[in-house]
Amino acid sequence: MIKRIFIIAAAVAALISCANPEARKAKELAFRIIPEQASHFRFERLSDTMDVFELESVGSKIVVRGNNANSMAYGLNWYLNNYCHTTISWYVEDSVCMPKVLPAVPEKVRISARAKDRFFLNYCTYGYTMPWWGWKEWEWMIDWMAMHGVTMPLNITGQEATIMKVWEHFGIPSDKIRESFTGPPFLPWNRMMDIDKWMGPLPQKWIDGQEDLQKKILARERELNMKPVLPAFNGHVPGAFAKLRPEANIKAVTKWDGFEPEYGCWFLDPEDPLFGEIQKVFLEEQEKLYGTSHVYGLDIFNEVHFFDEIEGEEWDPEVLARISKHVYETLSQADPEAIWLQVGWMLYHDSEHWTPRQVEAYLGAVPKGKVAMLDYFCDEAEIYAMNKNFYGQPYFFCFLGNFGGNTNLSGDFHSLSDKIERVFAEGGDNLLGLGGTLEGFGVSQFLYEFLLDRAWNTGVSDEQWVRTLADRHAGEASEGIENAWKVLTDDIYAGGATYSGICPVSCIHPCFEGHWNWTTLTSVPYTFDQIAAVWKTLLQNPEDTDFYKFDIVNVGSEVIKLAFDPERDAFTACYRARDVEGMKAHRDYMRSLYSDWDRLLACHGTFSLENWIAQSRTWGGTPEEKNYYEKCARLIITTWGGTGQLTDYANRQWCGMVTSYYQGRWELFWEEAISSVEQHRPFDQEGLDKAIRAFELNWAEPDEVTLAYPEAGNAYEVASEIASKLICFE
């Protein structure tokens, strides 16, 4: 208690001494992140108009200068990374490892940004990672973004509070409005005009709580010189409004990803006069609640079609130009300073229709500089290169890197580096900057650290950056950990684009061979021997940092996943040979892998189903409400919704989940396969599929399935014990 009082007193004294408000905000951030060391830093404001920071040792202080609080925050993080071997996790629960004595800066450092702005987040992140976050998680995340130089975060928390006011203005009862909303983790797809009603109606207490949270988020982001991207009206109207205004040009949107018609959406044509009227009310009500940065995210073609095509003909460029012109005019009439930010995913996802001719017409109908594009998925497609740098309109070059929050080792480090350098060289003067558009946080934080570092003129080579990364995870210079990370970035995080549906065999819908569905693609660009060698190197160089523990759990999890594959294949071979004893032996070994896997994952909180469930339940006030939120939390990471087309899309290898859910499905498969051989009858695939579907739906019911979790052990000891069974340590 005495120590804490001393730290608080020191913080107050230090903040009073910061006359400049920008420096004061940076100092406040330092006390939130590293409270015991923050008093050793001094923050000063530079007069530069561009984003720049300086580091210098002056007496006993580390002086961090910047043109604003955001640049100072990035400068602080640069010091922590490159002098203290410290990494700040994007999760608030992870500990921060700091040296006992702060290293001096030998000579003054000055680094400027080479990207005007840095964008971060994806609409889907609010469903796959952030739906249950409160202020504790958000406060930390905002600081993380500032420390990585993010200037334009997507911010759609609390959108439903605005929507409620809009439709109440037009005479829709509140219960009918809430009825059109989905459950919390599915709201991104409700906002993007993909689905209505699924796991609704949305409780009013949730809407009110998110409104309060959004106000805190925006206030802090603006303090740290961010321009939050808020939504605008995209034409999505509730079914009740379509019935109320039959004269309006409202159409049903194409059904999305296997959802039944009752969950379909309604779209108001942008050329209908009502579109502009609603847009004006939307932006006015939103500004009353949340203010504005004049940058609005608005997408009308995200995986949906809303107008009829003439078979065999391309979309008419004149029609597309007319649509974009009208949409922009509704924004500019409501806010003359409006910038329309659009997700470029549609240009990749529906490339059949979005040819360069269509893209040029669509973008060219908006005044130059008034529409900005997110080149959303550079991992796979560099859209700017296919469309003449977006025909002069500003854009962000974005790395997606993770679909659905999948917990896999995916992404191509060196390819990403090459693409970043190419866009800076060839992307034109209208390149606004870089962006991270991850669907979920998954386990690849370092790739986004790298991406955002490359938005600055650091002069650091890839090789040097990786060595520093390894030392940051170790907490000190470590040749062994550096060697492990060289292999990781050269051979593991390699092999091409990240893709959706990455899933190990141990977590797919059980089958004798293959991978069952597009949401469970099992191939990886490395072998068991390659990843096992990395694990062995890590374990031979023990460290005591949180990130080292994370690495040995993360990499070890991958080793266990790949150990499962040959066992599944051997089980299948025994089935075909009608070798019951062999089938049982391989089943038992796979069971032991699940057990070891669960124990390993329990050693680090990042891999915790229990945390995900507990966060969801905090939003409920009664047992019924808590169960509602928990069911939503269970659904999105398993069957998702609809007819099952998205089952396992958001698969997670989490403690408590690999045994209760994934192993549970395989147990049904093993039982059917073995009994079919023992009873000399055909394998009942149809019956098994029904049983597995019933199991999946039942698992999502909190009242039906009580989850159990192994106790957390010492990460190094547990990992070493399991590794000794799986890989050779000679």
Image (spheres, rainbow, N blue to C red):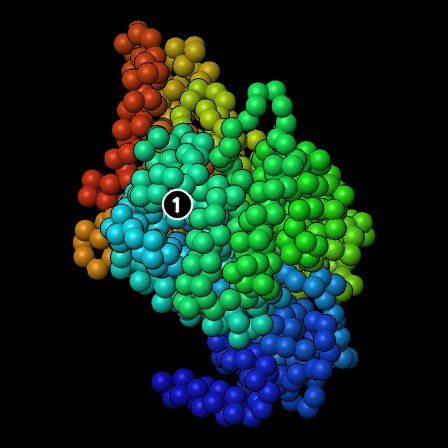
Front residue of 606 and 200? 200
Mark yes or no: residue 86 visible.
Answer: no
Q: Quadrant of the C terminus?
A: top right
In the displayed structure, would residue 584 be above or below residue 558? above
Determine the residue positioned at 32% across, 33% down: 262
Q: Is residue 511 left or right of residue 395?
A: left
In the displayed structure, would residue 377 be above or below residue 208? above
Front residue of 26 and 55? 26
- Disc 1 is placed on an element classified as strand
In the displayed structure, would residue 375 be above or below residue 566? below
Which residue, given by chain and number where applicable, does mark 1 sit on? 237
Which x, y percent locates residue 118?
A: 63, 60
Which x, y percent locates residue 671?
A: 30, 22
Determine the residue positioned at 26% across, 53% down: 174
Q: Is residue 156 left or right of residue 65?
A: left
Q: Residue furthest right?
A: 425
